[in-house]
Image (tube, grey):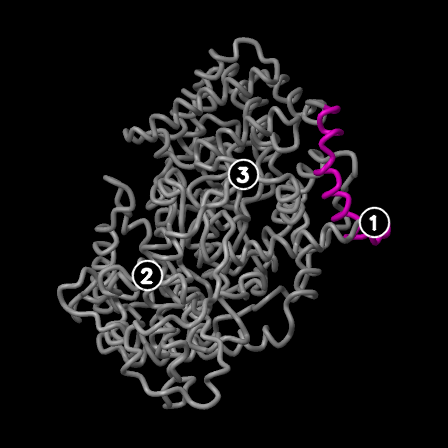
Amino acid sequence: MRSSRPLALAALAVALAGGLAGCQRAPTPDAGAAHADQAAAPDAGATEAVSGIDLAGIDKSVRPGDDFNAYANGTWEKNTKIPDDRSSTGAFVAVFELAEKRTAELIQGLEKTDPAAGSDARRIADYYAAYMDEAGIEQRGLAPLQPVLDEVGAIDSVAALSRYIGGSVRADTDPLNYTHFHTDNLLGVFVARGLEGPPRNVATLMQGGLGMPDREYYLSGAEAMANNRKAYRAYIAAVLGQAGTADAEAKARAIFDLEMKIARVHASVVDSQDVHKGNNPWDVASLAHKAPGIDWKAFLDAAGLSGEKTIVAWQPDAIRGLSALVASEPLAVWKDYLRFHALDHSAALLPKAFADLHFGFHGKTLQGTPQQQDRWKRAVASTSKALGDAVGKRYAERYFPPSSKAQVEQMVHNILAAFRDGVDQLDWMTPETKKIAKAKAATMRVSVGYPDAWRDYSALEIRRDDPLGNALRAEEREYRHQLSKLGKDIDPGEWWMTPQTVNAIQLPLQNAMNFPAAILEAPFFDPKADPAANYGAIGAVIGHEISHGFDNTGAEFGADGQLHNWWTPEDSAHFKAAADRLVKQYDAYEPLPGLHINGEQTLGENIADVSGLQAAYRAWRASLGGKEAPVIDGLTGDQRFFLAYGQAWRTKMREPTLRARVIGDGHAPGPYRALTVRNIDPWYAAFDVEKGQALYLDAGDRVRIW
């Protein structure tokens, strides 16, 4: 399932790459690490310190100044195979693998305790057991989905179609993607504080309706995209045929043609990132005039939104276009479209033939993954999604000790202080703008590990013999939870990720950050490792999240979470000029022949990378109290800091996955994020980077925004 939200509403720190891998520490290499012969001898206690660097993964045949990613990770990349059931592997996956294993142990262990009926433990155990009941799923066939298919079959008018579309709307709560909503939902709803006005929650409508990851999959002339389109048409026909649909081939062509029309009205990723283009409060009474086609009364009643006076249209032209298609396209095609998407959405919990077809297209074709994951992994992921806080509470209690929470909170405190100090040192920013920026950083809410309050799942029915029903009821429950926030004051402590999530997030509308427990593990955070590595890895992630509050989107929000311009014209012009240089820097990177990174699309993340790394370095240096860090494993402190950063972004991706990342993601692929170091002055001295080397930038060309 793919979903999205405007970047202004939740700027993501790090995108989880699928796959499994680990970083192994190796014995100290022989002489050859840069600067090893120039550094002071380590002190007596340093011999016991852990460097936190994967020494064996370094490729010393590459000069750091020519390709820092290849230097930091080249040997690792040569020796690493992407697991057959993953689309990529890398440092994030090392942490994900640990979280997956721990979550599986928690979930599977509950079955042995025979938890009490009605308890969250019972819900978790029953959800997982139902998902794993392959024999029962085969025996039930399409019967669990039949009520949905019957509802689609009964559609006999535009009003009925609008009612069905409204009734199938679900809440957008997944921050990993942000171009369109669930594949089977023509529209999605995001509930959060309005961009302007009182700090109350409002509903935002999002574009949706595409079965492939992004509109470019439909519109691009690239050969790879043409092949995907051909495979998608075949997949639609195969799913319909498996379900016994007559004339499956002809209906598949009509469904695909409808999705092409949907893609043509979709807003691009770059436009979807623009808070000003998305800030469109529409009076509900004017919807029929602003976006004719959908029977909006029927839609709103079914969606539970009939009581709202105002709804925000994030992609207004797309919503107009989608609404028009509801009225203009044949009802029979819409019904076939909805039938297919109901089957596609539920495929994992239908008989094996459907699950295999689903993986064949979404996994093999779109991601290049040759082998489907073991069922227990899919069951763990689904259980964790449906009962996120119930699983997360147990995860945090067992695996995230108070000592780690305190250590990370101290790092956050130090990096926030370093960020504020960095603002003071900016020679281009006016005192007025500096004052407001520092006040925003000072009031930023930091939540580490887990939320202060947990979700209540007592109203969620989980049955041991109804795996598909469990998943659909969990989605419905989440939607109702989000609707319950409408019109209420925002909760500044609300979390958007569960503790078992390997990720982090910045929330401009709350002026807050969440750092889930699961990401606070080696190689990002190791309480036994030298501080240089911790600051270079998790410290840069923390700095990244802080900086998202001041990137090209976050900088438009004040400390109160409200959208307003707090920049002087002169400061704004300087910020834009620096951002434009960063856009050009990333535009030049070419991950695949003819496919360049879009520097505008990835700008917010790139700003956060540069500024976050700068703040983490400054905080680490301040933590030394004026002393030099010891040499460990033949590496100076600065070298360990930057190597930890580079190795945190080590990534190996299958070509279709890499292509999808470049086309539709707001983040540059990991190997290019590792090159952020070329904008940081101390990196040059740490690795003797000289003019003429590929990554060298003259001092005036190095981008520094904060």
Query: Do the numbered discs 2 and 3 sit on residues whose CB atoms are within 8 Å?
Result: no
Dot 2 or dot 3: first in sequence order is 3
Q: Label 2: state its secondary structure.
A: loop
Which residue is more in the foreground, 32 or 399?
32
Q: Residue 118 carries which label?
A: 1
Q: Say which residue appears at 42% left-offset and 24% top-offset.
A: 231
Query: Is 542 on the left or on the right of 676, as rendered?
Result: right
- As shown in the figure, which amino acid type bears the numbered disc 3? Met
Closer to us: mark 1 or mark 2? 2
Which class describes the residues within 10 Å of circle 2: few (<14), some (14-19), or many (20+)?
A: many
Q: Residue 66 carries which label?
A: none
State the extent of the magenta-drawn residues as a range. Answer: 112-140
Q: Label 1: state its secondary structure.
A: loop
The overriding secondary structure of the stretch rendered in magenta is helix
Q: Name the residue under label 2.
A: 59
Which class describes the residues within 10 Å of circle 1: few (<14), some (14-19), or many (20+)?
A: some
Q: Name the residue under label 3.
A: 1
Q: Label 3: state its secondary structure.
A: loop
